[in-house]
Amino acid sequence: MKTIVLLELGGTISSHTYQKTSEFYNLKGESISSFIDDFSSTENINIQYELFCNKISHELTIRDLLSLGNKIQDIVDRPDVFGLVVSMGTNAMEDVAYFIGLVVNTRKSMVFTGAHFPQNNLAFDGRKNIFNALVVATSDCIQGAGVVITLNDTVVSSRWATKNKPGIPNDFSCEGFGILGYVAGSVFHQKMIPVYKHTFNSIFSIRSIRSLPKTAVLYAHFGFDIHYIQHIIDNSSVEGIISAGYGKGYQTREASELLCKAATNGIPVVRCTRAGQSVTNIDINYDDKYGSIVASDFSPHKASLLLAVCLSQGLTPPEIQDVFEEY
């Protein structure tokens, strides 16, 4: 009998809508603990339910994030626990799941899921997603694979997961990137494993993080006011900058020169593409000149989380560059 802890955070999966065909919700629904009876016949699973909070995911704070990390570390450290399922809103699921994979040290399964529609919507998918998450969490082969997300019968690594079609049911994969396998019926079919560092081989630990330094994401666009950069240099408490630039991450010459000034003043600057996931190599003609760290294939928002974790541990720019290439 495998013990799986089911941790509830709120979100669409825990809500009701005012109209059965509406994608929006405004009422509190039943706790997902009410779903457990649906899975009582599932063999070899002992489900233990816990409520962490009931919040829309994009309302979670840094304090919530750190508290959640410590809570999850407590759970997976228990010798009787085989794995963990977290239900939450999908808006910030990719951010939270990736952060947990950076700072919670374990080989045990950690599976995030949620719903695209509220409980009383005609298209409610939450029960099936919870069932699939339990199937994945009890699989022996997912142990040591890091944090994953399952939606629409698909299992995606949190490293690659992205909500790229808001309003349309999707599996959080981006052009197939990050798919580790599928759930068919009540069987998880794993096809691959992630090769980057996470969880059990991460140098980061939630136990050593008391706060996360502030970071700023600067999104390149026509009409961008470069005085924002000067404000960060002169007056802000921001400790790191994500430069989400054109193409593979390029800003205008004026913006690049100010970002170089920020880097010279001790504020690390990470260059990434505003397009989201891509492949960005070190450009010695640009990065050596302007002193930027290269984000490899991170989206701006995940790059900001990784940078904040690095800064919380006092890593130097060369060390941060290594982390962006390995994690």
Image: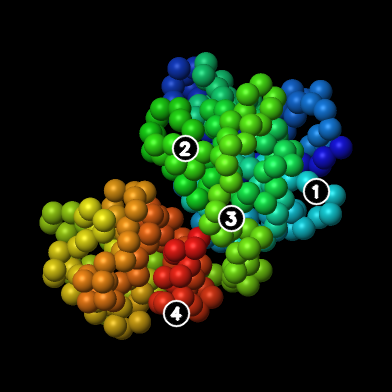
Q: Earlier in the sequence, mark 3 or mark 1?
A: 1
Amino acid found under the numbered disc labelled 2:
Phe
Q: Position of residue 231 (x, y in %)?
A: 25, 73
Which residue position is annotated with label 3? Answer: 101
Q: Position of residue 28 (x, y in %)?
A: 58, 32
Q: Helix, strand or loop at disc 3?
A: helix
Q: CA distance from mark 2 to mark 1?
A: 27 Å
Q: Position of residue 327 (x, y in %)?
A: 50, 60
Q: Is residue 308 above or below residue 96?
A: below
Q: CA distance from mark 1 to mark 4?
A: 37 Å
Q: Earlier in the sequence, mark 3 or mark 4?
A: 3
Residue at image location 58% in from the left, 37% down from the top: 191
Q: Earlier in the sequence, mark 2 or mark 1?
A: 1
Q: Helix, strand or loop at disc 1?
A: strand
Give the class, few, some or many, for how many residues have Cα within 10 Å of label 1's Cα (few <14, many ≥20). Answer: some
Which residue position is annotated with label 2? Answer: 172
Which residue position is annotated with label 1? Answer: 81
Q: CA distance from mark 2 to mark 4?
A: 32 Å
Amino acid found under the numbered disc labelled 1:
Val
Q: Earlier in the sequence, mark 2 or mark 4?
A: 2
